[in-house]
Image (cartoon, grey):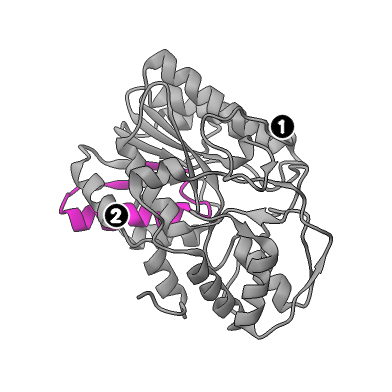
Amino acid sequence: MKQDSIGSLNELEENLSNPTSGVVETLGRLDSDVLILGVGGKMGPSLSRMVRRGMDQAGVNRRVIGVSRFSSDKTRQQLEHWGIETIVCDLLNQNEVASLPEISHVIYMAGFKFGSSANPAMTWAMNCHTPALVSERFRNSRLVAFSSGNVYGLVNATTDGSVETDAPSPVGEYAITILGRERIFEYFSRRFQIPMALLRLNYATELRYGVLVDLARQIHQGKVIDLSMGYVNVIWQADANANAIQMLEQVSTPPEVINIAGSQILKVRDTCEQLAECMGKSVRFSGHEATDALLSNAGKCISSFGNPQHESDLMIRWTANWVLQGGEHSSKPTHFSNREGKF
């Protein structure tokens, strides 16, 4: 039985980085250190710490190395406190990428999303050029790269969501560049026979950031909830981290493609009403649910790794309690309700 609430940042960080038995088994079988590119983002710190904790529990003495520009020295210090080595590197700089150590297992988390509409050139450079530099440098490695469910576009909300064999139909420049990232990785995977996996994530959430946080904060502030994007996928970040790490053993040439998403499709209206009840608040809505939404089918991932350990009711309850008690938040909304793909 999982706890009803998470009361501190330390508890949250412990939860997000707690390795599953599958993660420990995977890391125990790996034959090298693990390099994580773009470790300074929202998911990187908890994922890298899960790798570190998983290796320790597996009894293997290997390094976990996190690479980022590290605009926040606090993040770098925290990672090193957790036993993760750090390297400062601009992944758009070919010489700096070339100087990175030779590591057999690489997790790629770098990307540019928020602000992409205002800076499309950077969006293309970061999301498409960087994968080429990384593929050239790590042509002798196994590479797991994060992608996004945004490559699919909107699907009928009465379905179970897009599956990996569906044709991409990205909406907006960000989603187009994410498909570009996949194509660049696929090209180099075929050219150099690099075993890869592409992880189409949709959407990771924790207590400081995510769709549920957006909704809970709006309810808490008495704001009206727009229902136009009426359905959504969410997966607890720890579950997404675990799936990503386990994919290090499921790479292939051409790349293995897999959706990482929650096991349920949530109706935004019902989710808001549940959040409001947990917080003792009322909720108001505007508009009506469109017949389509950005939804991913996690069936393939569940077949490989089992159901996520954190179900929607638990995530909703934790989020409501966290917002109600004034817990820390990132101040970066997901804009998940944007139907034009502008971020």
Which portion, as a residue range, is magenta? 35-64
331 or 313: nearer the viewer: 313
Q: Please name the residue shown 22% across and 40% down the image.
A: 30
Q: Quadrant of the N terminus?
A: bottom left
- Three-letter amino acid code of the residue under disc 2: Arg
Locate residue 53, reporting x and y percent.
28, 58
What x and y, as percent, mark residue 318?
51, 74
Location of residue 159 in the rendering, given as x and y in whole percent from the top left corner: 61, 44
Find residue 121 and name its label: 1
Q: Is residue 206 visible?
A: yes
The furthest residue to the top: 191
Report if residue 41 lies within the magenta region. yes
Which one is in front, 325 or 305?
305
Amino acid at dot 1: Ala
Mark 1: few, some, or many residues within 10 Å (few <14, many ≥20)?
few
**x and y percent of residue 77 in the render?**
42, 61
Residue 1, which numbered label?
none
Answer whether residue 94 is visible to the viewer in this image: no
Q: Secondary structure at mark 2?
A: helix
Residue marked by disc 2: 52
CA gap between label 2 and label 1 equals 35 Å
Q: Residue at x 34, y 30 (%)?
A: 142
For residue 121, what is the image quadrant?
A: top right
Q: Quadrant of residue 78?
A: bottom left
Q: Earlier in the sequence, mark 2 or mark 1?
A: 2
**Does the magenta run of residues contain 32?**
no
Total tally of numbered discs in the picture = 2
